[in-house]
Image (cartoon, grey):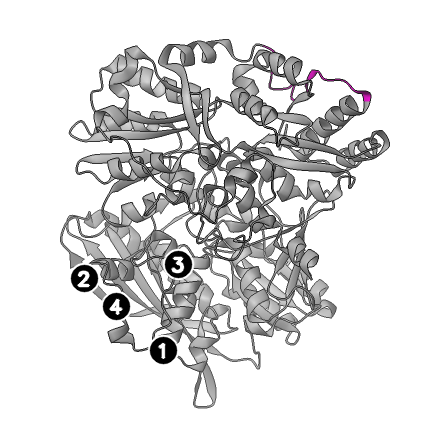
Amino acid sequence: MKYLDEFRDPVVARRILDEINRVVTRPWVIMEICGGQTHSIIRNGIDQILPRGIELVHGPGCPVCVTPLELIDKAINIASRPGVIFTSFGDMLRVPGSEKDLFIAKSEGADVRVVYSPLDAVKIARENPEREVVFFAVGFETTAPNNAMAVWQAYKEGLKNFSILVSHVLVPPAMSALLSSPRNRVQGYLAAGHVCAIMGWEEYEPIVEKYNVPIVVTGFEPVDILEGILMTVTQLERGEARIENQYSRAVQRDGNPPAKKLIREVFQVSDRKWRGIGSIPMSGFQLAEAFRAFDAEARFNTGPIEVEEPALCISGEILQGLRKPHECPAFGRQCTPQTPLGATMVSSEGACAAYHAYHRKRLVDETV
Amino acid sequence: MKPSEFKTNGLTGEAAATNKGAALSEASFGTCPLPITAHDTVQLGHGSGGKMTNDLISKLFVWAFDNPALKRMDDSAVLPLGASRLAISTDSFIVDPIFFPGGDIGELAVYGTVNDVAMSGARPLYISLAFILEEGFPLADLRRIVESVRRAADRSGVTVVTGDTKVLNRGKGDGVFINTTGVGLIERPVELSSSNVRPGDRLIVSGSIGEHGMAILSKREGLEFESPIVSDAAPLSELVDAVLDAVPEGVHALRDATRGGVAAVLNEFAVAARVGIRIEEGTVPVEPAVAGACEFLGLDPLHVANEGKMIVAVEDAHAARVLEVMQAHALGRDAAIIGTATDTDAGMVIMRTRLGGTRVVDMLVGEQLPRIC
């Protein structure tokens, strides 16, 4: 596949790996932000071939994982109401709420449909004027333009039966929150390439300055990730802290201005709760004043829902890079992809699910 | 009877669901080793061909009907019948859309069953054909399906000898469901079973994978790719014959890689035969269009369904010959050796990545879910 195979080339990967080995003189802790990167690292066994001293810790960039439990409960609550068609990306259906997941709600009669784009949800709304169609708008900056476009489209068409349940979070505030924690171990970041393709990297400049950490905008293929690691390690070894762009085939400094304009129009920045981490000020989006009519929480008056996370689940510490999935006592025992206790085990991008799917063999070796 | 095909996302699933979720109580099943999973109602995942399906089969059906033929959990049951051996398999078909690039539900209903019979080394001879139709279903579509059943039966060398028709009230079905049962005779002295895979066996896939699943998915979701993906639905009995004619001894197991894909078959081998399986990334043939579509949707081609591909487990000494024979056949042109059974890591399928790392290739847990981003 053009533009893909060349970034999976084992010969090129090996060359970069040799270079990393040449450059590194001491241990470093690097966090990859995005769940897609975590998945690629585990799937390709990248963490197994790195020099021992380089530790990759897995960041909070899995939208499914950080969506708060109460929002899943609200989704199930709305989906279960008569007349509602609840649409969502497939990932969200198996995320356990406090009592059940959307799959179970579906088997109990809720009309829950998987869509590939929020615009498909708008289409469903257009075709079913007598039904209320709700889209579960989950994600980081990457999915924000599409979700904004769906609302904009519905607004323009005057669709009265479309709304979105918003759970939008932003990467830079989470990066700052992690770095300012007294327990922080992260010394360098691989920033999420797709997020930067939309937003650019201007927002990271103050973070680099304040916390003195290298940030390398990195892609998702093995060669991208190895190159991102090489650039980060090189900076760390030299005592530098700059923003670099490994993913130059997709990312420019100012990102995608039309997409950013649309986001700014439809959404406004607000405080957001992150599952496992807690509330982070100004770390997400809510609908802007002019588009409040499309807010499903208000339309269905879900009210506040208070819930407790399963006590066994340590996904919060995993999302902050403080612990690894297999260090959790429930990992692979009470908590499996079939019976997930936390969202990090549900989403294919979640660190726990990735460890469970691909690393079981290595874990067995280590414990024998 | 064919244990792996107790489908629960269609007819049997509907029956269970209308039972008001009472599931199967201890009263009716004595010391039933439920819970099947954490669920107390049937979920779509129970019919996905992955782990949830396997749990349902082993913890409920095999438990309830405990017998040697069923316990083998192969694609078809092999039964002694006088001096010869009979292979029998049943399958229900609930595909949406019913017409898709490269085939339709009628063709699938024949090939799916015929292939399962063929995997035991049997020559498929007869099939039954049962329709469950929804009131209002266009007769023209039904005619088209029946014609394609006839064509597929002719191509597979089987005769449709009995059938059944039921009609559901409008809204109670999804147009058309089909059940077929196939029987065949095993005329060779072969013993093919997933549990017969031995350490050292080579694993051969008969061609590029994932085409049926992606053809269905792209049609269902209205996804368009540069070159349309066409289902690989085809009868495999000729290919099986060619392999077993050329190599009468040394073939240990055959399995068609339908729901759950190649990953499911390899895991079934690993578990049934208590062997480990090692495969090399990059040796598994995948067409660029399928690879691209999977990439786009965040799916792994190893998990995607096929309807005309099989996996052969054969002793190393005969592997080259089997490969040669398969590649000489139109349906095995792109056959490739993808891995080896090992005496370590029993029950696991491990892939060596192109970069030199390793990862476990698991079965899907439930429904295959496209990723968010």
Could you tell me which secondary element the residue under label 4 belongs to? strand
The chain letter for the residue carrying disc 2 is B
- Same chain shared by disc 3 and disc 4: yes
User: In this figure, which residue is indicated by the disc labeled 3?
Assistant: B152
On residue B65, which mark appears? 1
In the image, A238 versus A305, the foreground residue is A305
The magenta segment = A238-253
- The Cα atoms of the two marked residues, 1 and 2, are separated by 27 Å
In the image, B194 versus A190, the foreground residue is A190
Q: Are marks 1 and 2 in contact (CB under 8 Å)?
A: no
Q: Is residue B122 visible?
A: yes
On residue B166, which mark appears? 2
What residue sits 34% from the left and 36% below the top?
A: A70
Q: Name above or below for residue A344 compared with residue B350.
A: above
- Same chain shared by disc 2 and disc 3: yes
Q: Amino acid at mark 3?
A: Ala
Could you tell me which secondary element the residue under label 1 belongs to? loop
Q: Earlier in the sequence, mark 2 or mark 3?
A: 3
Left or right side of B300 for B7? left
Q: Amino acid at mark 4?
A: Gly
- Same chain shared by disc 3 and disc 1: yes
> Disc 4 or disc 1, which is closer to the eye?
1
> Disc 3 or disc 4, which is closer to the eye?
4
User: In this figure, which residue is indicated by the disc labeled 4?
Assistant: B163
Where is the N terminus of chain B found, in terms of image quarters?
A: bottom left
